Amino acid sequence: VSTYLSDDSFDDEVYSDYEAQFDPLQRDRQARRKRKAKAKHVPKKQQQAVIEEIAQTTGLEGGFRTTYHPSLFEEGWLLSALQPFYDQALISDVLAKVKGGKEANVYRCAAHDTTGMRYAAAKVYRPNMFRNMRNDAVYREGRMMLNQRGVSIRENESRVMRALHKKTAYGQEVAHTSWLMHEYTTLQTVYTAGVPVPVPLATGGNAILMGYIGDGDGAAPTLNEIELERAEAAHLFAAALRAVEIMLDLNMVHGDLSAYNILYWEGAITLIDFPQVIDARGNTQAEAILRRDLTRVCGYFAAQGVAHDPDALTDRLWRHYMQPKAPLLPTVEDSL
Ligand SMILES: Nc1ncnc2c1ncn2[C@@H]1O[C@H](COP(=O)(O)OP(=O)(O)O)[C@@H](O)[C@H]1O
Ligand SMILES: [Mg+2]
């Protein structure tokens, strides 16, 4: 099986690129030019051939047979995105497609025995997600670009930044990786802080593996798909607000919060979909984005009989969490 498109080789390729960038010996123009030629990306046609090859052989030689039958178009990118999870013994099968979203498809996988879980959810980004990702710059303001290890890329790495601005294939790859790593590291942070989110399990070059909410018959519905009793709605609204508060305390605003990104399962909510989380202090639009999130959430709950004023809530939360914190201990100036 050609593993050319597997995440490991993707990592190596990009990483060696960074490595070369940081190597002072490579500063020399000629070496630079040479390296540039080497790092050139596979032409589309060749890449298509590789995808077809993977699609034809992965299921057999790679030992990765799936119960779910992907379409011919899906198969190449799906299996190459999930292969690392399979290789790391995190999943043993792909059982069903949960949903095809705007930017990603989510699949229900059989978790490997060693994980102690029955299922896992794999969110796999579409190859063309960038064309759909609107207002990228609005969300990026105040956040670092992350490489595939979740480490921020230095702002002064002019080649990377230039590639980003010019939207070259390499620049798109960097941006894509950064989005994915933001989603994954955010999921880890908020999970640890106690926000009700799926447990983060792993990330690969084009996918995130996390806890699956639902059962063998289907995934948990999103709130917009269901109606709630008033008492339960009040309870869940409080839980949603609590989640927003924990995130604010972490200096984060979800950025795409609504009844479409909150799952309901066994009387509890789970927040999902974290690529557009923004930096509450570093982003000048943060308060407006928080207001939009709360307006959408309040809109859903108002229809379930629990009315709250999103503007008043936004003002209160913003004032409370964004005011500069006074130091607890006396400062040097105080003792002078
Ligand atoms: N961990 C999960 N468990 C069960 N279903 C999920 C999970 N994560 C996502 N989903 C389902 O997949 C859909 C798309 O996922 P989401 O992260 O919202 O991506 P998108 O950016 O495409 O909206 C969700 O609306 C939800 O129905
Ligand atoms: Mg969504």
Image: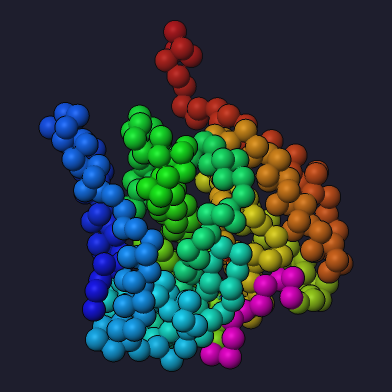
Q: What stretch is highlighted in magenta?
A: 216-225
Side of 111 where 298 appears, left or right: right
| Place of residue 259 in the rendered image (x, y in percent of width and height, measured from the top left) | 71, 65
Residue 316 seen in the figure: no
Task: Give 235 or 11, whichever is nearer the viewer.
Answer: 11
Task: Write the residue at 41% across / 63% down.
Answer: 206
Residue 283 vs residue 236, the one in the foreground? 283
Residue 308 x %, y %: 83, 54
Specify the quadrant that holds the C terminus. top left
Magenta stretch encompasses residue 223: yes
Q: Which of 1 and 284 is in front in this view?
A: 1
> Would residue 113 appear left or right of 25 to someone viewing this image?
right
Residue 171 belongs to the span the image colors magenta: no
Residue drawn at the location 70% of the way across and 60% of the way down: 258
The colour scheme used here is rainbow
Residue reaching furthest top? 336
Q: Please give left or right for residue 210 compared with residue 256 in the image.
A: left
Image quarter hosting the N terminus: bottom left
Rendering quarter of residue 12: bottom left
Residue lying at 35% horizontally and 31% vertically, measured from the top left? 158
Expressed as whole percent of the image width and height from the top left, the position of residue 25 reads 12, 32
Quarter of the figure with residue 299: bottom right
Q: Residue furthest front?
A: 45
- Determine the residue located farthest toward the left in the rendered image: 25
Residue 152 placement (x, y as % from top left):
36, 42
One can see residue 302 in this view: yes
Residue located at (32% from left, 77% from top): 54
**315 versus 246 height, above or below:** above
